[in-house]
Amino acid sequence: MRELVSWAIIALISLTGAVGGVLFKYGTMKFGGGEIQPQNFFDIGWSIRYFFTPAIFFGLFCLFIGRFLMGIPLSTGGLGKVTTTVTIMTILFTIIASRIVFNESYSLKVYVGLLLAVISIVLIGEG
C-alpha cells in the first residue's frame, strides 16, 4: 500500500508539473505575440508584466508546488530514482497535454522515446 501511495504522489507531482508547463506555454503565447528575446528580461517593467500575467504566474506556481512536493518521495527514496521518475512522468504528461491543448504533433521517434521512457520508469521503479 505504501508503494502505491508513493507512486500516486509521484504521479501527482508530475501532473502538477505538466499543468504548470501548459499554463506557462499558454501565457507566454498570449503575452507578447512574438518571440521573446533574452534582453527583454533586463527590462524590469517587462519582466514584472510577464511574471504577473495570470497564466504565467499560475504556471510557475504549479511548477514550484510540484517540485516542492518532491520532498515527500525524497524523504524515503533516493534522489536519482525520484528525480528521474518524476522527470520522465512529467515529460509523458506534458506531451499528452500539449497534444490535447495545443494540438502539437510528434514524430514516430518521439512516440518510441515515450515507450522507452515508460519502460525506464518500470525498471527504475523496481530498482
Image: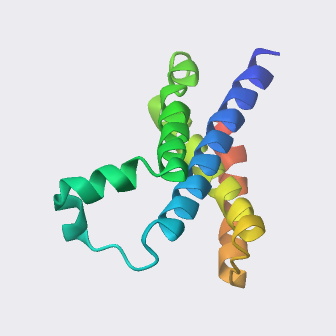
Would you say residue 12 is visible in this rendering?
Answer: yes
Q: Residue at x 23, y 60 (%)?
A: 41
Colouring mode (rainbow / by chain / secondary structure / one colour): rainbow
Q: Is residue 38 left or right of residue 85?
A: left
Total number of numbered discs in the rendering? 0
Q: Is residue 75 left or right of residue 90?
A: left
Q: Nearer the viewer, residue 85 or 13?
A: 13
Q: Nearer the viewer, residue 61 or 93?
A: 61
Q: Residue at x 72, y 73 (%)?
A: 111
Q: Residue at x 24, y 55 (%)?
A: 45
Vertical position of residue 35 compared to residue 122: above or below: below
Report the quarter where the C terminus lies. top right
Q: Residue furthest right?
A: 1
Q: Nearer the viewer, residue 93 or 53?
A: 53
Q: Is residue 126 left or right of residue 38?
A: right
Would you say residue 126 is visible in this rendering?
Answer: no
Residue 36 locus on image (x, y percent): 34, 73
Residue 34 locus on image (x, y percent): 42, 80
Residue 52 locus on image (x, y percent): 41, 47
Vertical position of residue 95 compared to residue 88: above or below: below
Q: Residue at x 83, y 16 (%)?
A: 1
